Image: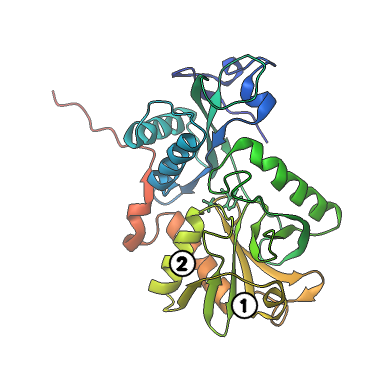
Amino acid sequence: MSVPRYAYFQGRIVPYSEAKVGVMNHTLNYGTGVFGGIRGYWNPEQEQLYLFRLTDHVERVLRSSRLILAEVGLDVDELRHLTVELAQREGLRQDCYIRPLVYNTDEIIGVRLHDLHPDLAMFVVPFDKYVENDADAHVTVSSWRRLEDNSLPARGKITGAYISSAFIKTDAVRSGFDEALVLTQDGHLSEGSAENVFIVRDDVLITPPVTDNILEGITRRTVMTLAQEELGLRVLERSIDRSEIYICDEIFLTGTAAQVTAVTRVDHRPIGDGAMGPVTSQLRKLYAAIVRGRVPKYRHWNEPVYVSVPTPAV
Ligand code: PMP
């Protein structure tokens, strides 16, 4: 992965090489940060870069910040504009990923959330696929459990929490799988290592409720809307038992990075007939068109980065 040209750091856009923290940094030592992940999609016909659901992502970053008492004094509009400005400066004409990061600048010893000095950093990198095998993924049910909300708030994108996702992902990949599904402490399906999960049973789309320790995914919400409005499917939010994973018709994962990833095998068992199912396939096509700004009905989800500057009046 190439290094960005610029970063937003200490209140301004600077060359990436100047955006550095010291080894005593509080967030580096204790994981006391929160982050976001926003995809930018290049549309070659329109020569435009579209950020997908920017407002929703920005709102979640600010909500996550509040959760760890790390408010940086920016409102939704300010953070939106800053994101677009940085993307403009970076100047990419390809798909990319934007990472806003709220971190504590303090260089001190002492684990706590209070009386710290949070700040925002942000960068943009070119980005393609996250799950390589996203049309035919083979996943396992992880032996790790999903974070319990009463131990570590599951609905915040908290940097330190991702060590759990790292354990889940590495063990899955080292055992030859593409990804893993993770269960809650009481054995219900929660999500993937960095994706929400859906199953299809008899033409009903089912996904775990927000009370099953999931991250409240923006792609999850997008897919629920599309399934109802465009495919006319019934969508249920309810707890999912482990055995339902093995007997359902289709499974897919959703996430900003993973987009809509088809799962065709779980622990060496084929799902449905072992190939991508019709609901997953239709949602993938719809999603791919919408994120690139090709569906007028959903253009409000596409934030254009590049403006055509009008020629000044003489
Ligand atoms: N769960 C976790 C743990 C994640 O990190 C992500 C990625 N942000 C998701 C789910 C999917 O969320 P979203 O669709 O908002 O990217």
- Quickly name the residue at label 2: 224
Q: Secondary structure at mark 1?
A: loop
Above-or-below relation of 72 to 179: above
**Seen in the image, is 190 located left or right of residue 294?**
right
Residue 172 in view here: yes
Q: Would you name the residue on which mark 1 appears?
A: 277
As shown in the figure, which amino acid type bears the numbered disc 1? Gly
Q: CA distance from mark 2 to mark 1?
A: 17 Å
Left or right of 198 in this view: 310: left
Q: Residue at x 57, y 85 (%)?
A: 202
Viewer-proximal residue among 253 and 107: 107
- Amino acid of disc 2: Met
Q: Where's the C terminus, which quadrant?
A: top left
Relative side of 213 to 247, left or right:
left
- Determine the residue positioned at 71% across, 82% down: 273
Q: Viewer-proximal residue, 45 or 242? A: 242
Name the quadrant containing residue 139.
bottom right
Considering every residue shown, the one lying at the far front of the view is: 150
Q: Residue 176 falls in which quadrant of the image?
A: bottom right
Residue 241 location, x and y as percent? Answer: 66, 73
